[in-house]
Amino acid sequence: MAEQERVVNDFGSLPEETRQALSGFVEGAQILEIVTAHAHGVVETSVNYLRDGKVYDVIYDETTRKLLGGSEPAVFDHVIEVLPESGRAAVKVEAPQRIRKIKIKHDDKDHREYVHLHTIDQNGNISSRKLELDGRNKQ
């Protein structure tokens, strides 16, 4: 089944549990766009928001009730803390430059989750790496 996306016009129209999970991240920020995506048997809600002149996003899985990722340091900490210890260590080693974005994604081939990590080096170059939840390189 193809992914189906839909724009949500009002944060208040999201399910209560989703609002509670996301409100701590978007509180005090200007919400720019909310998108729900139905894919892989789950519903993901992504909120783009403006804080201190910078655009961020946060992604929540309404089906499994867990934070999947985003682009703000407060989000990174929450995503990293649910990884096994070896996964947490691998992400922290991988990101000495600076994490730009992190997301737990779903692999279409084997239906397992993995971490997609984007980092920025001191020259502003962005690199991307996929890791198993335990920190090993994704095959």
Image (spheres, rainbow, N blue to C red):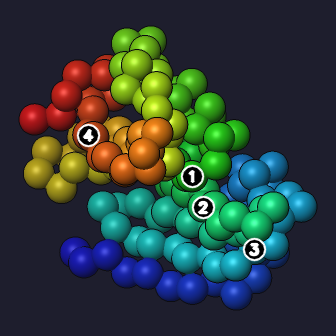
Q: Residue at position x 10%, y 35% from top?
A: 139
**For numbered disc 1, what is the local secondary structure?**
loop
What's the residue type where badge 3 is placed? Ile
- Counting from the top left corner in percent of width and height, residue 130 is at 26, 40
State the residue lying farthest toward the right.
28
What's the residue type where badge 2 is placed? Asp
Which sits earlier in the primary sequence, circle 3 or circle 4? 3
Query: Mark 1 and mark 2 in contact (Cβ < 8 Å)?
Result: yes
Which sits earlier in the primary sequence, circle 2 or circle 3? 3
Q: Residue at position x 70%, y 87% from top?
A: 9
**For numbered disc 2, what is the local secondary structure?**
strand
Label 1 to label 4: alpha-carbon separation = 16 Å
Label 4 to label 2: alpha-carbon separation = 19 Å
Q: Mark on residue 57?
A: 2
Which sits earlier in the primary sequence, circle 3 or circle 1? 3
What's the residue type where badge 1 is placed? Ser
Q: Mark on residue 71?
A: 1
